Amino acid sequence: MVSFNYQIVKKKGLATNASINVSERKGVVVRVPFWMTKGMVEGFLKEKSDWIIKNLERLNSKKVVKKYEDGEKHLYFGQELTLTVVITPTPERCSVIHTDEYLQVKIFEGISKETQSDKIKEALLYWYLEKGIEVLTEKVNNYTKEIGVTYKEIKLKRVSSIWGSCSPTNCLSFNRKLVMAPHEIVDYVVIHEVAHMVHRNHGRGFWNLVEKYDPQYKNHRRWLKLNHHLLSI
Ligand SMILES: [Zn+2]
């Protein structure tokens, strides 16, 4: 047994060698020729376990942990804003004000120090979701009109492994972390999902359509692979 979870993908055709990929989104994925038995795969992983563990540790150390305290930087559609916490004597609901440079959160002085960061996080999350739906709806409206399709609804979801999806009934879901990503990246994800209303696959026609509206789509896709650890709420 090895000390990490992994996923096995069987290679098609006459592949003779196995390969390993470690990523934050998918974890450890080992691709093996179809004839390799589970025991053989385990043996291969054991042999490579030092390398795998080193890479898993490297990914974990990159994760950004937020404390929700005064002065901390938070992203809003790619813009880095400074969180300012304002203690107010009036008992009101925690509220968020957004300026060019700051995200100001007002919090009642009666809230204990221990629960302060939880309350701030909660208020920010609520604000992010509200703004996120607003901005994403605008983008979706824009691209569905351009491409000539109609959608049913838009949702922001808490998911870790996907950026967006489009159901067969044209309900669009987006990862709520996108609220932190730069606009051009969000546009790419929106274009990608809207293009699925025309092509329900990742064939050539699909990518041609994506490229028409986002000529830089390859860079944007790469950006998501390399930077998604920055987008933690
Ligand atoms: Zn897709």
Image (tube, rainbow, N blue to C red):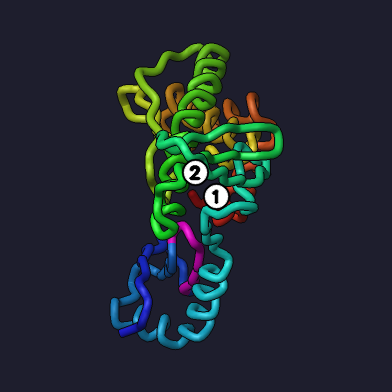
As drawn, which residue projects farthest toward the front? 89
Q: Position of residue 168 (x, y in %)?
A: 32, 27
Q: Which residues are magenta?
A: 18-26
Label annotation for residue 93? none
Disc 2 target residue: 177
Residue found 35% across the figure and 25% down from its top: 171
Q: Tell me: residue 1, above or below residue 21.
A: below
Q: Is residue 193 above or below residue 138?
A: below
When the figure is inspected, residue 80 is found, relative to residue 50, above or below; the finding is above
Residue 222 visible to the viewer: no
Q: Is residue 212 left or right of residue 189?
A: right
- Label 2 residue SS: helix
Locate residue 167, reporting x and y percent: 33, 30
Residue at image position (64%, 25%) is 212
> Which residue, given by chain and number where applicable, does mark 1 sit on?
231
**How far is mark 1 from mark 2, CA to CA?**
6 Å
- Quarter holding the N terminus is bottom left
Q: Is residue 204 magenta?
A: no
The numbered mark, 1 or 2, whose residue comes first in the sequence reads: 2
Query: Is there a contact, CB below 8 Å, between mark 1 and mark 2?
Result: yes
Amino acid carrying label 1: it is: Leu
